[in-house]
Amino acid sequence: MRVYLDNNATTKVDPVVFEEMKPYFVEKYGNPNSLHQFASEVHPALKTAMQKIYAGINAPKEDSVVITSCATESNNWVLKSIYFSEILTGKKNHIIISEVEHPSVIATAMWIESMGCKVTYLPINNEGLIDAEDVRKAITDKTALVSVMWANNETGAIFPVAEIGDICAEHGVPFHTDAVQAIGKTPVSVQAINVDYLTFSAHKFHGPKGVGALYIKKGRELLPLFHGGSQMGGYRSGTLNVPGIVGMGKAIEQAVDALDFEMPEVRELRDEFEDALLEIPDTFVVTPRNKRTPNTILISFRGIEGESMLWDLNNAGIAASTGSACASEDLEANSVMEAIGADDDLAHTAIRFSLSRYTTQEELDYTLDVVKKAVERLRGISSTYSYAPEGHVSGLEAHH
């Protein structure tokens, strides 16, 4: 059996989405900015897709949604535009992010920091959550931006973005949230919270890879990252990815429509699977279930390297991960595990299982059987586990 439980890294394209995209590869392939009928015949589909995208995040028509290639581009665009317009000019000299943002935010913030800007990295507690009041304490009159993700890609922890948005609005500081892991898992409305910039990416909610978007509230401007064309109102030059935009429109429509009836089913599958995993001795899960997205489990098996577990899972045809796919080749300790205070040994034991609306009970039963066998095999050859004193509690486990 082949089982895919790495849906926080990417998702399969919904077959309905794929069918919607197909005509725009080989039948209706005109460049929408050209002045002939091949171009104009794609305009209705683009308009419909954009309407679906606006509806998917409840964006008012006076605000902007700019199509990008991915969330990494969108995140870079927000932070670097703020750097060039606010920090390099000397108006401001400070940004705030969490210490567990996606690598595209962390790496960009570190680059900005290397340019002389002060960066505050907000801590998370031992449940993997941020305290919104820490944002209030960190804001100064020199703060140019606060960027905190809506939901964490590794734990599924849902951060208090509504409270953070209110605090930022109170202080007149722009607020950006990376909502990549939220759409299709929890309701997302840019009118329900005070948010100025919001990032998302189609391939995380059963749309195609290579297309994402950035929401920009009216009155909040950004310097273009790319120059050379008039596409997207001059915000983002480059020929529009028509099949991708059509696919993202359909995918976000499907994802939002499925929230009420499919996510409860995913949550039930996840909870039962998690309960079974926690019956294995010396395991624990980060972040309480009611505070994370319904599809995600970040679990540690004491005494077992995450990469070793992945090896056994992969050999059995099961896809999982040890954290963010954008940083998985680094083979470093899980960043969230480090942030919540796990010791070095425990920080290397985390495995992330992320389900989707296509995950089945049969797949989870098979995975559980493989995990149990892998735990028995790997702990049997683990000096860390085999020779630990009976009753020994290490690292973060002391806090649980």
Image (cartoon, rainbow, N blue to C red):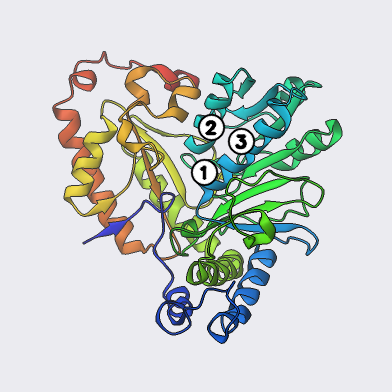
> What is the three-letter code of the residue carrying label 3?
Lys
Separation of marks 2 and 3 at Cα, in angstroms: 8 Å
What residue is disc 2 on?
A: 108
| Amino acid at pointer 2 | Thr
Q: Are marks 1 and 2 in contact (CB under 8 Å)?
A: no
Q: Give above or below for 162 relative to 216.
A: above
Which mark is in front, 3 or 1? Answer: 3
Dots 2 and 3: beta carbons under 8 Å?
Answer: yes
Q: Is residue 30 left or right of residue 375?
A: right
Give the residue displayed 52% in from the left and 52% down from the top. 294
Q: Position of residue 136 (x, y in %)?
A: 77, 25
Q: CA distance from mark 3 to mark 1?
A: 26 Å
Q: Which mark is residue 80?
A: 3
Q: Residue furthest right?
A: 170
Going by the image, does 79 lie left or right of 340? right
Task: Say what secondary structure mark 3 lies in.
Answer: helix
Identify which amino acid the numbered label 1 is placed on.
Answer: Gly
Q: Is residue 114 left or right of residue 224?
A: left
CB-based contact (under 8 Å), mark 3 and mark 1: no
**What residue is drawn where x is 41% and y is 40%?**
324
Is 113 situated above or below 130?
Answer: above
SS for callout 2 = helix
* Residue 203 sits above or below residue 323 on the image: below
Mark 1 or 2, nearer chain start: 2
